[in-house]
Image: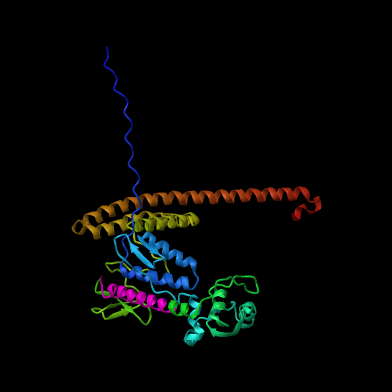
Amino acid sequence: PPPPRPPPTAPPASPPPRPPPRPPPYSAEQILTALLRREAAAAARDWAAADALSEALARGGVEIDEQARTWRSEDGRSGVMPPGPASSGEGGGEAEGVSEQALVLAPADESRALLVPLGAGDPPAYGPAHLERIFARFHVESVEEVGGGYARVLFADGGMASTALSQFHYSPSGDTIKGIATARKFREGRGAAKAARAAAEQAWEAQVAAASAVDMGGGWVAQWSGAHGCFYYSNVALGLTQWEPPDGVASGAVPAAQAPLVGYSDDEDDEEEEAEAAAKEVEAKETPRSAAAAASDAAEAKPAKRARRTAGEEGEGGAAAAEAAEAQAAGAEAQAQAAGAEAAEASEDKAGAEKRYKAMKVAELRSECERLRPGAQRGKA
């Protein structure tokens, strides 16, 4: 009897697709520059630009923690965000305008005074007179505007002030009045905010100093300008100093001032060649008479560029690669010329057919005119 047939084997599984190449890690100077541009865009309420920079940083492996005001890179580097606008803690940034004199009270008035925000707008939606009516049931003695969008309300005693602070109060428009606090709370919040900002500025300056004076290659060094709040670039050997990042340095160029941060990929050369070839093909279709030249250029572009790149990468073996590429380009050029000749011939045939068609239509129209006109006018048709 014949031997038993072997069990069917499953076809080998195809390997999983390769993930797209990751962009190279950004330098510290690139990250800090992008963070500064992101903060500037957010301050100008250009949310699209700020989000684009956040996404570009994320593609480069940089995560931003908005709550902690820090950033972290995949390679283990970390740092702080640029210092934001000044804030006094209690009352927010608007309380920066509250005068120091308004926060320093006599011991007898310390417990019976509250700082209450005024209505938004200029002039404010509600002012001291409205606050006096709102807090009238708590025995208000005086209401005084103290700047920064706040007013100081002085009550008859500390018990009334504590009772007013523990309850909700509503503006004339029906909104809850938020941000009411004692002068002590304001002083403590302002002091904590100043200390936090000083620490953030100190950490940012240390971070910038670490990113400065680093050799970028080619003799270029990035330096921090405190007066302008950005990096500039100098090259002692060349005697150059400039704001724009240098081209062709080993560490890569800093992103342009208005462009999002992008990483470089080895596939960019191939994409550029394919785009040029596609553009030339479209031009050849739109202009039949230059079809041969356009097809020749499209055929030559890719082998020639690859030959130049191979010659630069392989060193001594570049000459042989260049000769092979030139031979390939010559063959492609011959094919392109033949295709161009065929295209030109087809174009001429098409033009001749169009002329014959037009002549036929003219003859038909003249015949129709002869048929419709009276006999006496046929000679003038």
Towards the viewer: 12 or 305: 12
Locate residue 195, reporting x and y percent.
Answer: 38, 77
Which stretch did the figure color magenta?
190-216
Magenta portion: prevailing SS class: helix
Tell me which residue sits at (28%, 59%) in the image: 309
In the image, residue 58 above or below residue 204: above
Tell me which residue sits at (27%, 73%) in the image: 210
In the image, residue 161 above or below residue 372: below
- Quadrant including the N terminus: top left
Locate residue 267, reporting x and y percent.
Answer: 34, 56
Q: Quadrant of residue 307?
A: bottom left
Q: Is residue 17 visible?
A: yes
Q: Quadrant of residue 240?
A: bottom left
Task: Let me know if residue 212 is in the magenta part.
Answer: yes
Locate residue 106, reporting x and y percent.
Answer: 48, 87
Q: Is residue 86 visible?
A: no
